[in-house]
Image (cartoon, rainbow, N blue to C red):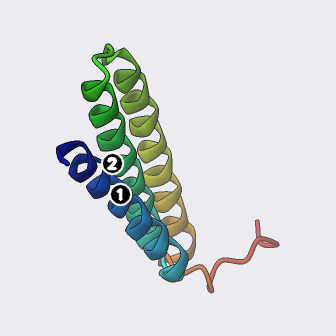
Amino acid sequence: MLIFMNLFLPIFMFIVGILVFSMKYKHLLSTLLSLEFIVLSLFYLMCVYFMNFNHEYFFTMIFLTFSVCEGALGLSILVSMIRTHGNDYFQSFNILQC
């Protein structure tokens, strides 16, 4: 029963993150926050999985490294978009502009 409860929470978090990502797509910041929430739920799921089967936690460190790089890349894109367009609306972003 305890294993079920430990697996239910990160799966629920993942589903909620996917729903927010698919419904709140007007702002870049809200999509980045929902992506980070999905990464957090996957990290929690991996920790629970490795804890239940007595594996090493080295892969979680690699996963955290890549998720931090993904977050830094997303923030740099957000800053670049705000500097060039003045806001983070996807409606004001035109791909054909230089």
Identity of the residue furthest to the bottom in this view: 91
Disc 1 crowd rating (10 Å Cα; few below 14, some 14-19, many 20+) is some
User: Looking at the picture, how far across and down is residue 35, in whole percent?
Assistant: 45, 58
Q: Residue at x 29, y 33 (%)?
A: 47
Answer with the quarter of the image where residue 3 lies. top left
**Label 2–label 1 contact, CB within 8 A:** yes
Label 2 sits on a secondary structure element that is: helix
- The amino acid type of the residue labelled 1 equals Phe
The C terminus, quarter of image? bottom right
Q: Is residue 71 above or below residue 79?
A: above
| Numbered label tally | 2
Q: Is residue 12 left or right of residue 86?
A: left
Identity of the residue furthest to the front in this view: 1
Disc 2 crowd rating (10 Å Cα; few below 14, some 14-19, many 20+) is some
User: Looking at the picture, how far across and down is residue 30, in whole percent?
Assistant: 41, 72
User: Looking at the picture, how far across and down is residue 11, in whole percent?
Assistant: 38, 56
Q: Residue at x 47, y 68 (%)?
A: 31
- The amino acid type of the residue labelled 2 equals Leu
Q: Is residue 71 above or below residue 23?
A: above
User: Looking at the picture, how far across and down is residue 27, in whole percent?
Assistant: 48, 78
Q: Which mark is residue 28?
A: none
Residue on which disc 1 sits: 37
How far apart, in angstroms, are the residues tagged by discs 2 and 1? 5 Å
Residue on which disc 2 sits: 40
Label 1 sits on a secondary structure element that is: helix
